[in-house]
Image (tube, rainbow, N blue to C red):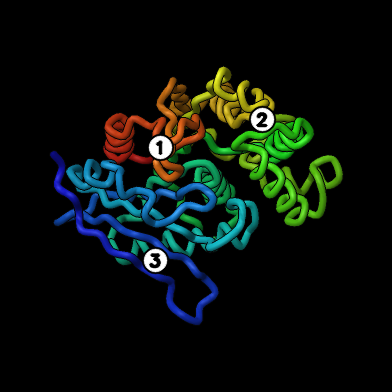
Amino acid sequence: MYHAPATHVVEAPEGGEARYRYRTYVPDGLVRGLVAYLPHFGGTLENWETSLLPSRLAAFGVASLVGLPIPEGTGYLTAPDLRALHALLQDALRRIGCPPDSLILGGFSAGGVGAVRYAEVAVSGDLAGAIRPRAIFAVDPPLDISRWYRGMQIVIRRNWPSPNLPESMYVSGVLRETFGGAPDEVPAAYERASAVSSHLPLGGNLQHLRHMPIRLYTEPDVDFWLDHATDLYSLNALDVVFAVNELRAMGNAHAELVVTRERGYRADLGGMRLPHAWSIVDEADLAAWIERQLATRPD
């Protein structure tokens, strides 16, 4: 049984531009690294209350946090979103006393997009001062925003009652407002914001991760989604599998794909069966992967 690490909630200073909040899990003694986890859209700081990952990491001398850099929005799609995440990470590393080169960043759904996009702008230099993570992980993230939008339009057109229908109607409207139109109307705006663009050479922004250790998770339960009038065009599995294949083609030997079966249940939704869920992650295995990344000397 793992010992629960000390936990503390941190709020952004009043009067500043940033409005982040995060909960830390810090082990006793010297901290070897920091794992920052970004929850899904609508998630809270309590999302890891039932998770054993912070305790497993603390046993390795690794601190962790669950953070909310942006109070509202659909994800990490704009420069202000990424700057807010940067402010949170800077503050956490300073408070915890963790070396910046020992940061591992991850997330679920929209949070997974944030982890991948932040790593991309850190490598590309598009965000001045951004901290290059040692490694990143993401659980079923919608990485290609154009594909995501078009998939939601399919769900809306079918108008079949499903867990995806209300969210598709809301999110596609927010995307049009954020970018000034649909992907066919303003393609460049979607390409700039997307972690992956499958129609662009080297996957668009994905090319910046050709040397980054990355682990992506997905559970493409086709039988489940068929009962909800949803198919592969509307599943994030398309983006996830493409990203790993494309990175491997670029020579990234540390791009990993984990495909799960019948693990997806949502505690935050009353335990309902849903393949789009953090629960598809084997936390013991992820903790071991994180430990290996921190034991490997960064390039």
Q: Is residue 56 visible?
A: yes
Mark 3 or 1: in front is: 1
Mark earlier in primary sequence (3, 1): 3
Looking at the image, residue 135 sits to the left or right of residue 164; the answer is left
Distance in Å between CA atoms under marks 3 and 2: 37 Å
Mark earlier in primary sequence (3, 2): 3
Q: Amino acid at mark 3?
A: Asp
Q: Residues within 10 Å of mark 3 (few under 14, many from 20)?
A: some
Q: Amino acid at mark 1?
A: Gly
Looking at the image, residue 127 sits to the left or right of residue 104; the answer is right
Looking at the image, residue 152 sits to the left or right of residue 67; the answer is right
Distance in Å between CA atoms under marks 3 and 1: 34 Å
Furthest residue toward top: 223
Q: Is residue 135 visible?
A: no
Residue underneath mark 1: 271
Residue underneath mark 2: 234
Tag shown at residue 67: none
Q: Residue at x 70, y 32 (%)?
A: 160
Q: Residues within 10 Å of mark 1 (few under 14, many from 20)?
A: few
